[in-house]
Image: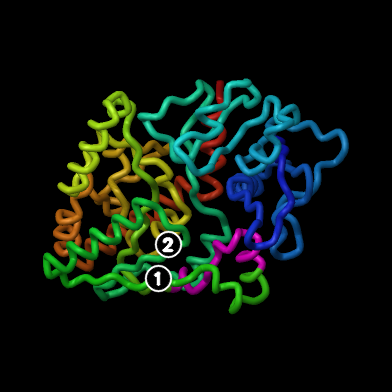
Amino acid sequence: MKALFLVLPSGPPERSNYQHSVVQLAEGMQAAGWEFYGTIPYWAPDGQPLLKAAPAGFSPDYIICDHTYALASEADPGGMQGSILIDLADGYRSLATDHTKGVFKRILRAHYHADIPYVPQVRPWFFGLTNRMRQGVDATYNQEPAQNKIILHNFRVEHELRDFALFMLAKRLQEQKSGWQLKARLSDNEAGTTLHGLDYQYWALSGRRHDPAFYQMLGQHPLSLAFGGYMWESPAVLAFPDWAKKLAKLWWLKLQKAPASFYTLYNYDSWRFWEVMYAASVPVHLDLAAWGCTLPVMPIAGQHYIGVQGYDFAKTVTQIDSLSQEQIRYISMAGRQFAQEHYGPEGALRHFLAAVQP
């Protein structure tokens, strides 16, 4: 099989044009023996580009781009005609909801949600893992979770849900006199001042998303927060009068509960979620299935990660307090196996082939 990736050149760390899905899928193709190229060379942390420039006359079976390229080329979409878009863009609305020109043969949308109306060619997608991320975790991996009661949180970008979840979890841990405590965060942006060689190149090319110290810390903390996302009224609630929507939101927040039937959770996927799941740490997130979040293969709360029901952080703290060391180890190992099987480069290629079928 043959593939051509439409790519942008890498920029400086703060504007790196990191095209995660391109790297992930190309690594899967490389492992499977595909012939693939980029419109220009791309992803060369060791000096050898993963994607070499396509030779003249190359005829691919698939033409692929991600949202970074698509948004930069929106004014002139002709070159993307018939291509497959991988859309990891932030926001409730994106090319997957607003695109109506029929440019893309298929749109693979991360943050896919059952409540959001999409154009017919959209299929669920994900962030997942690349070889860089797996190697970063593997460098210090120990299958035995750390035997302490410290929960790591290290969010590179603040989200509405992250701020609220961190506040609520800290409050419930204190109120319920839990034996667990939260660990202060690191700064990803400062990592570039201490990294050298290949690690620095990874940090710069990935838009400051690579930090070996963070990967090492995952092995030192049995649980890690992996929340991501924003809350938006579901289509049913959007039909309410404005005064009713405001009153309902205030009431639900006061109760510290939010029924999934009234809210839509978007931007819920993240690199952190998969890095934690692959490591010897257990991710803590909202219960994705209960909130209508959709992935090609769904992780199971309580088996692959700890899922908060609604906004019931009190119940989550009770659940965490009840976990034995052996139970934490079981969830950690099951999560790692799940992430490796379904959400690494090899799994990405399988999901890609399933998604692009007519």
Residue 319 location (% of width, % of height):
17, 57
View extreme (left): residue: 176
Residue wearing tag 1: 185
Which kind of residue does numbered mark 1 sit on? Arg
User: Residue 106 appears in which quarter of the rendering?
Assistant: top right
| Residue at x-position 32% and y-position 52% | 285
Residue 74 location (% of width, % of height):
68, 33
Residue 130 location (% of width, % of height):
56, 54
CB atoms of marks 1 and 2 within 8 Å:
yes
Query: Which is nearer the eye, 321 or 115?
Result: 115
Predominant secondary structure, magenta span: helix
| Residue at x-position 43% and y-position 44% | 267
View extreme (bottom): residue: 194
Q: Which residues are magenta?
A: 201-216
Q: Earlier in the sequence, mark 1 or mark 2?
A: 2
Query: Eyeballing the image, is 65 above or below 166?
Result: above
Question: Is residue 207 in the magenta section?
Answer: yes
Q: Is residue 28 shown left or right of residue 111?
A: right
As helix, strand or loop, the secondary structure at mark 2 comes to loop
Residue 309 visible? The answer is no
Q: Which mark is residue 155?
A: 2
User: Residue 230 appears in which quarter of the rendering?
Assistant: top left
Residue 201 location (% of width, % of height):
66, 67
Q: Which mark is residue 342?
A: none
Query: Eyeballing the image, is 196 above or below 115?
Result: below
Residue 334 visible? The answer is yes
As helix, strand or loop, the secondary structure at mark 1 comes to loop
Question: Is residue 111 in the magenta section?
Answer: no
Alpha carbon distance from label 1 to label 2: 7 Å
Q: Is residue 356 shown left or right of residue 245?
A: right
Looking at the rendered structure, the number of numbered marks drawn on it comes to 2
| Residue at x-position 49% and y-position 30% | 123
